[in-house]
Image (spheres, grey):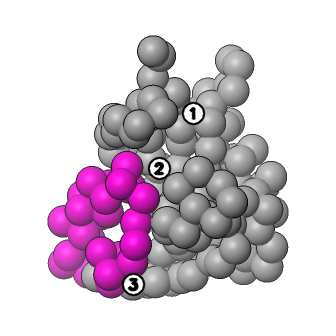
């Protein structure tokens, strides 16, 4: 089975990072994650991320840099989660794929019920941003 490529944004605003909770009726419902989605067709990872953030959150971001990739095997298949550090000055006011959105401190990320694929990304963020 092919690995599905999924992009996500680690979106910073001031000293906080955005996480979103998946709606209960969706796969992994109730888990918190970094927003993003599947790469489609011939899109670059960056194009895919920008499209997904507009579609899901109506949020425009500036992609700063590629951050970290991880492969996670779920019961229904595997994903490669490709993350990017982003920034925004906007506020999220709507969400199509999530029932809650929160801006949290990096140091608090592991206190949330994170989707399994996001945990290794969170550990890398905490390691990199621990000095801040």
Name which residue lies at 40% across and 66% down. 114
Query: Does the CB distance between marks 2 and 1 fall below 8 Å?
Result: yes
Boundaries of the magenta span: 108-132
For the residue carrying disc 3, how many other residues have a C-alpha within 10 Å: few (<14), some (14-19), or many (20+)? Answer: some
Q: Looking at the image, tell me whether mark 2 or mark 3 is earlier in sequence order.
A: 2
Query: Does the CB distance between marks 2 and 3 fall below 8 Å?
Result: no
- Secondary structure of residue under mark 3: strand
For the residue carrying disc 1, how many other residues have a C-alpha within 10 Å: few (<14), some (14-19), or many (20+)? Answer: many
For the image, the number of numbered tags is 3
The image shows residue 95 at horizontal and vertical percentages of 76, 68
Name which residue lies at 51% across and 30% down. 5
Which residue carries the number 2 mark?
A: 84
Give the CA separation, mark 2 to mark 3.
17 Å
Closer-to-camera residue (109/83): 109
Name which residue lies at 34% across and 39% down. 72
In reply to whether residue 130 is colored magenta, the answer given is yes
In reply to whether residue 86 is colored magenta, the answer given is no
Give the CA separation, mark 1 to mark 3.
26 Å
Closer-to-camera residue (119/48): 119
- Secondary structure of residue under mark 2: strand
Which residue carries the number 1 mark?
A: 45
Give the CA separation, mark 2 to mark 1.
9 Å
Question: Most prominent secondary structure in the magenta stretch?
Answer: helix
Which residue carries the number 3 mark?
A: 105
The image shows residue 23 at horizontal and vertical percentages of 67, 66
Closer-to-camera residue (10/62): 10
The image shows residue 82 at horizontal and vertical percentages of 44, 40
Q: Is residue 25 above or below residue 94?
A: above
Closer-to-camera residue (62/124): 124
């Amino acid at each position: 089975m092919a690995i599905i490529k999924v992009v996500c944004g680690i979106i910073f605003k001031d000293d906080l990072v955005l996480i979103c909770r998946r709606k209960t009726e969706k796969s992994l419902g109730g888990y918190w994650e970094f927003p993003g989605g599947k790469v489609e067709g011939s899109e670059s990872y960056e194009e895919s991320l920008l499209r997904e953030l507009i579609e899901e959150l109506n949020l425009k971001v500036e992609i700063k840099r590629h951050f970290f990739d991880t492969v996670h095997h779920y019961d229904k298949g595997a994903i490669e989660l490709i993350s990017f550090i982003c920034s925004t000055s906007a506020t999220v006011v709507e969400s199509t794929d999530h029932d809650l959105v929160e801006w949290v401190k990096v140091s608090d990320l592991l206190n949330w019920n994170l989707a399994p694929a996001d945990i290794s990304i969170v550990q890398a963020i905490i390691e990199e941003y621990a000095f801040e």
